């Protein structure tokens, strides 16, 4: 198949590119490199089944030839990034989603939207089922991401219902693995980077807030499986093993053997207190369940960070 992946030079996008090429597909990778990097995909540039287009999908998209899938992953996705790029984030999830939907329609392609657990905001129901409508502050700092992803889901459903476009929507819960940028500000990247540099691990708030971390290969497997199933309503993809941020800090310290202290910092505004996916739908629909234990995933991730540090020296 011929697949367009937007946000292909990003963390998740680049892993999906690897997988789609391995599976024998032709991949057109699109990215404006605002938060992504060519380092993540440059190894494919000599592959005749791969092409890269440097483009901001918030502007009109022109692709020559046929497409079977448009997979829209492009967006700043870490709180630090979308606070720094609030307008770009709103635009890529609204205009960018509109443009990619229009492209899919024009090409007769299927459409896949990467949405987020952030559509649940600071949830008041645990675990979060797809049927939960969420608790989002539209004008808080996270509103630029949360509301634009909610819009993206709404317009994707509208294209499905109005134009009969064959669509998929996933809600991605916290994901980690190699290529998660050291400076992207997320908790896993911060802790590993800090631990390896023997700097204090920065815990925001008391560290009692929880997240559920999935390894990137599990997520990619879920994405691939959903392309094979006709289901248009949103599907949660996440690992239901919940842990506190403090537990994560201790685990990273243990696995890196770091002597870093733990430093407590103020909790950012609207930081969700608890996040835990209900993945019953993905389990029944896709026969999918996350396979990678957090210890194993962190070991792989730490090894990649060590390589990056060695290259930088
Ligand atoms: N966090 C932290 N220290 C950091 C970075 C993040 O304690 O250096 C906390 C953050 O406040 C949140 C959780 O870790 O409660 C997950 O943050 P992240 O930015 O990774 O993603 P989120 O799930 O909030 O989008």
Image: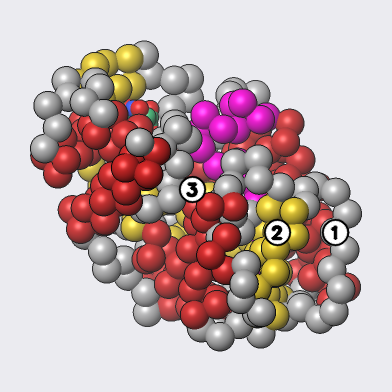
Q: Is residue 238 above or below residue 195?
A: below
Of callouts 1 and 3, the N-terminal one: 1
Q: Which of these two is toward me, 80 or 281? A: 80
Quadrant of the drawing holding the C terminus? top left
Q: Are marks 2 and 1 in contact (CB under 8 Å)?
A: yes
The answer, for residue 44, to whether it is visible in the render is yes
Of callouts 3 and 2, the N-terminal one: 2
Residues in magenta? Answer: 71-86
Q: Is residue 127 left or right of residue 247?
A: right
Quadrant of the drawing holding the N terminus? bottom right
Percent position of residue 190, x then y: 35, 32
Percent position of residue 276, x then y: 34, 48
Residue, far front: 313
Residue shown at the point (21%, 53%) measured from the top left: 299
Q: Secondary structure at mark 3?
A: helix
Q: Are marks 1 and 3 in contact (CB under 8 Å)?
A: no
Residue behind mark 1 = 61
User: How far is mark 1 from mark 3, CA to CA?
Assistant: 27 Å
Q: Which mark is residue 117?
A: 3
Residue behind mark 2 = 30
Q: Is residue 73 magenta?
A: yes
């Amino acid at each position: 198949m011929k697949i367009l992946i937007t946000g292909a030079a990003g963390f998740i996008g680049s892993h999906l590119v690897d997988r789609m090429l391995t599976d024998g597909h032709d991949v057109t990778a699109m990215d404006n490199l605002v938060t992504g990097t060519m380092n993540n995909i440059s190894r494919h540039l000599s592959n005749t089944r791969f092409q890269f287009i440097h483009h901001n999908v918030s502007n009109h998209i022109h692709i020559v030839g046929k497409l079977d899938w448009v997979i829209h992953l492009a967006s700043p996705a870490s709180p630090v990034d979308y606070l720094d790029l609030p307008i770009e984030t709103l635009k890529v999830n609204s205009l960018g989603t509109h443009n990619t939907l229009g492209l899919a329609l024009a090409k007769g392609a299927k459409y896949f939207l990467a949405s987020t657990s952030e559509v649940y905001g600071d949830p008041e129901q645990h675990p979060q089922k797809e049927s939960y409508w969420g608790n989002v502050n539209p004008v808080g700092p996270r509103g630029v991401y949360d509301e634009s992803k909610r819009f993206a889901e709404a317009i994707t459903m509208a294209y499905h219902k109005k134009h009969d476009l064959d669509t998929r929507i996933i809600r991605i819960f916290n994901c980690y693995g190699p290529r998660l940028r050291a400076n992207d500000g997320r908790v896993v990247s911060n802790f590993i980077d800090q631990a390896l540099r023997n700097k204090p691990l920065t815990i925001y708030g008391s560290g009692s807030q929880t997240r559920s971390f999935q390894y990137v290969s599990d997520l990619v497997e879920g994405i691939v499986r959903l392309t094979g199933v006709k289901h248009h309503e949103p599907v949660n993809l996440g690992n239901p093993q919940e842990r506190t941020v403090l537990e994560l800090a201790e685990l990273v310290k243990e696995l890196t053997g770091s002597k870093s202290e733990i430093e407590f910092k103020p909790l950012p505004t609207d930081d969700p207190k608890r996040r835990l996916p209900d993945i019953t739908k993905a389990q029944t629909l896709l026969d999918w369940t996350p396979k990678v234990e957090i210890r194993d995933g962190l070991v792989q991730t730490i090894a990649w960070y060590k390589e990056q540090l060695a290259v930088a020296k």
